Image: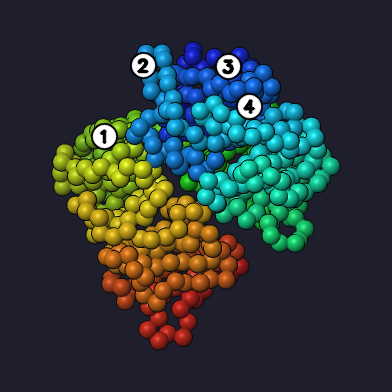
């Protein structure tokens, strides 16, 4: 994986520093700057429009910006009816496009705005600057959020701007903060220390010294439960969910100014002065660019976490995405390009295995067979379902996950069943979902110590039902050989211990057995 930076002269239309950026969907973004302007961008064409906010324009000196997670899902599902229509250089926005986003400012306020230009509410949040605010993504509509400021306070707010509680009073500025995956904990930093506070539990926060200088930025991976920090000591570091160190980079020439996890938790980005670096979740750097832009103040990943030159391998077949709509298929045994596959729309997700290549675009699903790459089965994706976020394959069928559904399809493109499970909570990923011919295995979205088992033929509960573990589960998989009586589930918990579990106990005294751990 590598970065490819796309620059355009029109991107210089902000005349002051840009302090906030977020994505509306995979092709459209929003930025805010010290020049008092909020802009909507069409990334493909590098065109923008100003968002006029009544009685606010000359007052906003922003420090951060974020759309609600609910707004992002709605905007993504409406992508087929693009809210920003371009005709030459003119852009217009849909009149019913009312997604809410928040902006924090240097005068201690939080502005709740929508993309129609309407000011919903102004909240007096902090003495001094309100440095950062974040939505609670686990509840419908982004039902609340929290904010930090120069006064050293961390406060929890309702969606309507009502103060719920003061979570912390430190006495020094809190520069960054973030939720964990299920929004049951939050991490925040002040000075050279980081703090983890569990909500609804009367206990002292976990505290540790993260850097030898000021901690300038942080992010908590929703999928992998890892904390990423950057500091004035010119290093970025990785920590687990309890604040234990996992990785520390070497020192760079300038302080780290921004960090951001991808939504799938497989990689993260680090920004510094004239530096942008792409790393995998273990901390290893895969790509580095040096844009001549000064310090990178903020980073945001698109919903599909698109990366250039996505490469997948199954046995002797290799699939490489070479641009937004093209995939090269190569036979590694002959070292030649066998086929070039093209899609009508932008590729969002793809997976190869069992002699099939499944490709999801923003509007359609392509099923390519190794027997004949030139005649794929093409299905239109259900309108309003959002982007495909996960594809998992087995021999006879595959699992397709988007923002509103989990379904099983066969390789003829026919839907076998829909699995009913809550749409709220941490999204499924390669570590928390697995499929075999006769079993679908899903970790619960909110209760991470619980594994659900489903029959892929009808969507009903399979085997002896759900598997309950004492600790949170971070990764799982299922074997592919044999029938349902031979099916076994392997999972790894947060303590680094590995377990094997039966689908059907059949009179066995124990359903779960430990088979390994980091202290064996």
Q: Position of residue 147 (x, y in %)?
A: 69, 41
**Nearer the viewer's eye, disc 1 or disc 4?**
4
Q: Which residue is rendered at x = 63% and y = 43% of the image?
A: 160
Relative horizontal placement of residue 326, taking residue 172 as reference (left or right):
left
**Nearer the viewer's eye, disc 3 or disc 2?**
2
At label 1, counting other C-alpha atoms closer than 10 Å, the crowd grade (few under 14, some 14-19, many 20 or more) is some
Q: Which residue is rendered at x = 32% and y = 56% of the image?
A: 407
Indicate the secondary structure of the residue bearing disc 1: loop
Label 1, label 2: how far apart the Cα atoms are: 24 Å
Instruction: Determine contact: label 3, label 4, CB under 8 Å.
Output: no
Q: Earlier in the sequence, mark 3 or mark 2?
A: 3
Label 1, label 3: how far apart the Cα atoms are: 35 Å
Which residue corresponds to mark 3?
14
At label 4, counting other C-alpha atoms closer than 10 Å, the crowd grade (few under 14, some 14-19, many 20 or more) is some
Relative horizontal placement of residue 26, taking residue 13 as reference (left or right):
left
At label 2, counting other C-alpha atoms closer than 10 Å, the crowd grade (few under 14, some 14-19, many 20 or more) is few
Q: Earlier in the sequence, mark 3 or mark 4?
A: 3
Instruction: Determine contact: label 1, label 3, CB under 8 Å.
Output: no
Q: Which mark is residue 87?
A: 2
Q: Quadrant of residue 27?
A: top left
Label 3, label 4: how far apart the Cα atoms are: 11 Å
Q: Which residue is rendered at x = 66% and y = 50% of the image?
A: 186
Q: Earlier in the sequence, mark 4 or mark 2?
A: 4
Q: Which mark is residue 343?
A: 1
Give the quarter of the figure containing the N terminus.
top left
Indicate the secondary structure of the residue bearing disc 3: loop
**Nearer the viewer's eye, disc 4 or disc 2?**
2
Label 1, label 4: how far apart the Cα atoms are: 36 Å
Instruction: Determine contact: label 3, label 2, CB under 8 Å.
Output: no
Which residue corresponds to mark 4?
19
**Nearer the viewer's eye, disc 1 or disc 2?**
2
């Amino acid at each position: 994986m590598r970065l490819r930076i796309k620059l355009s002269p029109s991107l210089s239309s902000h005349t002051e520093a840009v302090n906030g950026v977020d994505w509306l969907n995979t092709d459209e973004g929003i930025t805010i700057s010290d020049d008092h302007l909020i802009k909507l961008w069409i990334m493909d064409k590098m065109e923008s429009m100003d968002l006029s906010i009544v009685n606010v324009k000359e007052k906003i000196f922003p420090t951060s910006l974020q759309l609600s997670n609910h707004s992002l899902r709605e905007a993504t599902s409406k992508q087929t009816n693009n809210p920003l229509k371009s005709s030459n250089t003119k852009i217009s926005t849909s009149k019913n496009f009312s997604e809410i986003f928040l902006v924090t400012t240097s005068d201690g306020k939080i502005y709740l705005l929508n993309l129609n230009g309407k000011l919903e509410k102004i909240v007096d949040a902090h003495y001094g600057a309100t440095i950062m605010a974040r939505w609670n993504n686990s509840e419908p509509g982004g039902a609340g959020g929290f904010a930090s400021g120069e006064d050293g306070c961390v406060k929890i707010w309702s969606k309507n701007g009502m103060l719920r509680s003061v979570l912390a009073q430190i006495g020094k500025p809190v520069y960054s903060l973030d939720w964990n995956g299920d929004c049951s904990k939050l991490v925040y930093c002040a000075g050279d220390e980081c703090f983890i506070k569990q909500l609804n539990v009367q206990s002292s926060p976990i505290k540790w010294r993260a850097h030898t200088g000021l901690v300038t930025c942080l992010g908590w991976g929703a999928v992998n439960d890892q904390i990423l920090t950057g500091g004035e000591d010119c290093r970025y570091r990785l920590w687990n969910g309890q604040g234990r160190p996992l990785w520390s980079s070497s020192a760079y020439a300038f302080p780290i100014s921004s960090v951001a996890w991808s939504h799938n938790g497989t990689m993260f980005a680090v920004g510094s002065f004239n530096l942008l670096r792409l790393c995998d979740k273990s901390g290893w750097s895969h790509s580095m660019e040096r844009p001549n832009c000064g310090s990178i103040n903020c980073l945001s990943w698109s919903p599909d976490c698109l990366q250039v030159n996505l490469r997948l391998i199954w046995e002797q077949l290799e699939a490489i995405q070479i641009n937004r709509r093209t995939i090269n298929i190569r036979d590694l045994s002959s070292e030649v390009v066998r086929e070039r596959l093209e899609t009508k729309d932008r590729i969002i997700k793809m997976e190869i295995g069992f002699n099939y290549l499944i490709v999801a675009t923003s509007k359609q699903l392509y099923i390519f067979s190794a027997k004949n790459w030139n005649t794929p089965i093409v299905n239109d994706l259900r309108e309003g379902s959002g982007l495909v976020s996960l594809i998992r394959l087995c021999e006879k069928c595959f699992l397709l996950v988007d923002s509103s559904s989990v379904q099983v399809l066969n390789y003829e493109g026919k839907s076998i069943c829909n699995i009913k499970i809550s749409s709220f909570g941490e999204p499924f990923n390669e570590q928390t979902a697995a499929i075999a011919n006769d079993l679908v295995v899903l970790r619960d979205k909110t209760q991470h110590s619980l594994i659900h088992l489903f029959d892929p033929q009808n969507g009903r509960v399979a085997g002896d039902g759900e598997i309950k573990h004492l600790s949170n589960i971070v990764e799982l998989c299922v074997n592919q050989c044999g029938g349902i009586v031979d099916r076994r589930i392997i999972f790894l918990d947060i303590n680094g211990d590995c377990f094997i579990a039966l689908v059907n106990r059949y009179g066995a005294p124990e359903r779960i057995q430990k088979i390994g751990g980091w202290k064996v």
